[in-house]
Amino acid sequence: MRVCMIGTGYVGLVTGACLAENGNDVWCVDVDETKIAGLKEGRIPIYEPGLEDIVRRNVAQNRLRFTTDLKEGLADSLFVFIAVGTPPMGDGSADLGYVYEAASQVGTLMDGYKIVVAKSTIPVGTTARVQEIIREKLEERKKSDIDFDVAFCPEFLKEGAAVEDCLRPDRIVIGTGNERTAEFLKELFAPFVMKENRFYTMSIPSAEMTKYASNAMLATRISFMNELSRLCEKVGADIDQVRVGMGTDSRIGSSFLYAGLGYGGSCFPKDVQALIHCASSNGVDLSILKAVEEANREQRRLFIEKIIGHFGDDLSGKAFALWGMSFKPQTDDMREAPALTIAEALLSRGAVIRAFDPVAMEKAREMLPGDGSVIFCDDAYDALEGTEALVLVTEWPQFRRPDWDRIRELMKPSAAVFDGRNQLSPSRVRALGFAYYGIGRA
């Protein structure tokens, strides 16, 4: 089947590459000429395990192509996916300008039957508006006889595991009121669920809500555990032991029960805000989600307070090692990353930061000051040289079992360890003479 994918961000590039991997002819379209030129030369604009190999393999076999010309991508394509960004606006609502512009262009250029599938995360009612825009453009062209269908298929891709999630999804949600459209989409996605039927067909509004509701629930679990971690510190409990006790309950499960520095990235923050705004626009007060947002902000503030409580408010002349800059491991995405909040708080108090991340250093250089107050280091141990504290921010696997003897030699004698992800052994760290601060650990 021939597919046109509008947008080459996380969703569009990963989905397009995985569709090509399953034998489809895929055209990925983007207005960013630099990005498209880079993709044609094999340069992947994001770090995602496994993605580079799939892209290069399918480009070499002429199943995956990149262009800035939407007309070229639309030609002979049955499926047209809209996978453009929906960034948050000042009031928390989703900016749908890119989605509507893509719909307008499709309506202006299409010359035959298409199934237009919204893949971007969008509020309820947006897919219906996409349909209206396409119909209006066809009417302007006197081409109302051209038939088309619309659907909404939300993505459930985790950054750092997006390729695996796409190739072997938990479920595929198809939002449509048209049985023919549903069957076409099932045929397209069938190779992803060969072992088990994991298709769930529902109304378009239900599918649109499902995406937001899923991310909001996961964000709620994270914030709930972070709030519990604060109580654990006060009463002498250990949040990791509580997590195990909770997670083994089949009604709860163990996913997203880890206390830490809160959620970040491109999805949870904006999707929680967008759902709150959508509810408010419809006269509904989502008080729980408002508390989730506040708890997420508070978690970072309290972690910074632990550092300030140990060293005092004036950090002039003190160097801090930050291990991890991306908002989660296995990605270079620094959008809404806790590292940015922590770095800003330390720098504003006169500190010097020695930063290291396995893959996000280039992005970090773009987002942190270049005035010498942040030193970007070649490896994790280089970042520790002469520092007052190690601040573990991102739970990269390589940080779990460090060489503590080497760390002891590199850091100052009175150094402290601030474990923002509960990755380290408190007893081991303290036995070496470090002050240790974790999350929700007595």
Image: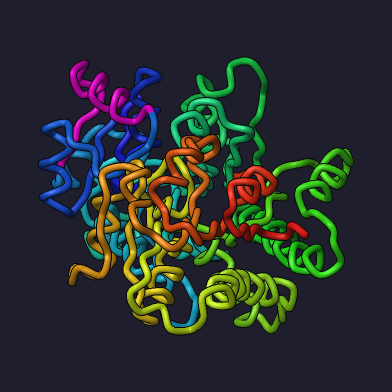
Q: Tell whether 246 sits left or right of 331.
A: right
> As rendered, which of 279 and 266 lies closer to the eye?
266
Q: Residue at x 51, y 75 (%)?
A: 311
Question: Percent position (x, y) of residue 217?
Answer: 69, 57
Question: Percent position (x, y) of residue 283?
Answer: 69, 84
Q: Tell whether 34 sits left or right of 267.
A: left
Image quadrant containing the C terminus: bottom right
Q: Residue at x 35, y 41 (%)?
A: 358
Q: Residue at x 25, y 19 (%)?
A: 57
Q: Tell whether 32 sits left or right of 202.
A: left
> As rendered, which of 135 and 332 lies closer to the eye?
332
Magenta-span inclusion, residue 266: no
Q: Residue at x 40, y 66 (%)?
A: 340
Count up the numbered dots. Answer: 0
Q: Is residue 206 among the parts visible in the rendering?
A: no
Question: Percent position (x, y) of residue 429?
Answer: 61, 47
Q: Is residue 298 among the parts visible in the rendering?
A: yes
- When the figure is inspected, residue 113 is found, relative to residue 9, above or below; the finding is above
Magenta-span inclusion, residue 57: yes
Q: Tell whether 130 sits left or right of 242.
A: left
- Type of colouring: rainbow
Image quadrant containing the N terminus: top left
Q: Which residues are magenta?
A: 50-67
Question: Percent position (x, y) of residue 341?
Answer: 44, 70
> As rendered, which of 217 and 76 lies closer to the eye?
217
Quadrant of res 284: bottom right
